[in-house]
Image: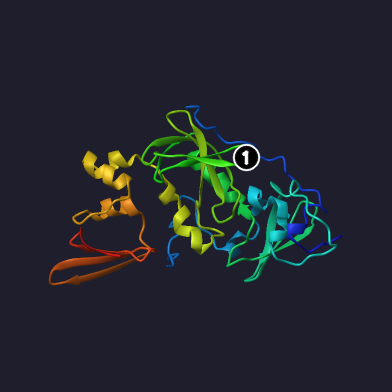
Amino acid sequence: MKKNILLLALVFSTVAAFCQNNNYLHNGAIGSPQSKDTVKKDAKFLYGPVKFRELKETVGETYIVLPLPQWVKKYGYSIYKGEISNNRNIDTLEGPGKLFILREIDDNVARFRDSKDELYTIELLKGYIPGVAPVYDIDEARKLFLNKTLWMNQDFIKIQDAEGKEQEVKGLRFEPVKVVNVVGSERSVHPIRFIVQTPKNETGFADVIVSGTNYNLQYLLQYMFENIFYTKDPKITYKFTPAMWAKIKNHEVEIGMTKDQVFLSRGRPTKVNNSTGGGGMADQWVYGDNTYFYFRNGKLATIQN
């Protein structure tokens, strides 16, 4: 049985990809323009609506090879470090969509096998496996959200033409969108792509982290599901004045805001410190941009930048 231990970057021109005609990736353009610091892993669903798994817990799971972003396609999969054999060149068309099973993993290397029992080795990068996404996350996200309505937390979705050029459709924060597909993205740091449609029939996408499995800490908070989408209409959940909603939509914060209002405006803090004194409950919210919010009895009392 032939075994080639290859870097993910250089295997795809030597071994025929199996199950590439799957629907876990989206090919071609998405939409068109209108003509006119550490987060603690203490819960299985802390990072999103799909169950978090340690990488070792995903041994036996199927992973999908993600397409390369347009700006690195000329380098092929050789951007990933690892053991190179046979000095073969890369064909970037052979890699995307390939499915293989994680067989073992340690602190440095993940080893996969495909349907032909070929062995692939990928070196971990900052604790995660680059260039791939767990198929479980795509399947579970589809079960939860396909053809459902979500409400935008970030202000925009992206549209992408067939050459990979992107534009943004802005002004969508708190607006409803319909999920028309869930596929793999182009980067494992935000591996799941929600293709959505706005009330104006604009189609675009937002890339998210749905489970936190195979995550890069640098991008975790930015692409957490709750920072991209709401599953319920926040304007029904929270009864604020139109003036307050306008401030929240613009990410503004002011003295006297409640914790809910600050949370909606700025998102989840990187760290929370709680204390109790003679003046009641005091809380400190710390954000990654070195901004500190101090609450007294549930109301924002001080802002420190």
Task: Using residue 52 as the reference point, say whether residue 79 is left or right of it.
Answer: right
> For this rendering, which residue is in front, 208 or 249?
249
**Circle 1 residue:** 26
Q: Establish if 133 lies above or below 242.
A: below
Residue 256, located in which quarter of the rendered image?
Answer: bottom left
User: Where is the C terminus found, in terms of image quarters?
Assistant: bottom left
Where residue 293 sits: x, y (%)? 27, 63
> For this rendering, which residue is in front, 151 or 155?
155
In the orientation shown, which residue stands out farthest toward the left? 278
Q: Is residue 121 visible?
A: yes
Q: Amino acid under label 1?
A: His
Where residue 80 sits: x, y (%)? 69, 61
Q: Is residue 240 visible?
A: no
Kindly identify the residue that appears in the image at 41 percent across and 42 percent down: 152
Kindly identify the residue that appears in the image at 71 percent across and 52 percent down: 74
Q: Secondary structure at mark 1?
A: loop
Residue 85, located in which quarter of the rendered image?
Answer: bottom right
Q: Assess disc 1: are there few (<14), some (14-19) or many (≥20) residues with their C-alpha within 10 Å of its C-alpha.
A: some
> For this rendering, which residue is in front, 214 or 9?
9
Image label count: 1
Q: Establish if 168 lies above or below 187.
A: above
> For this rendering, which residue is in front, 231 or 208?
208
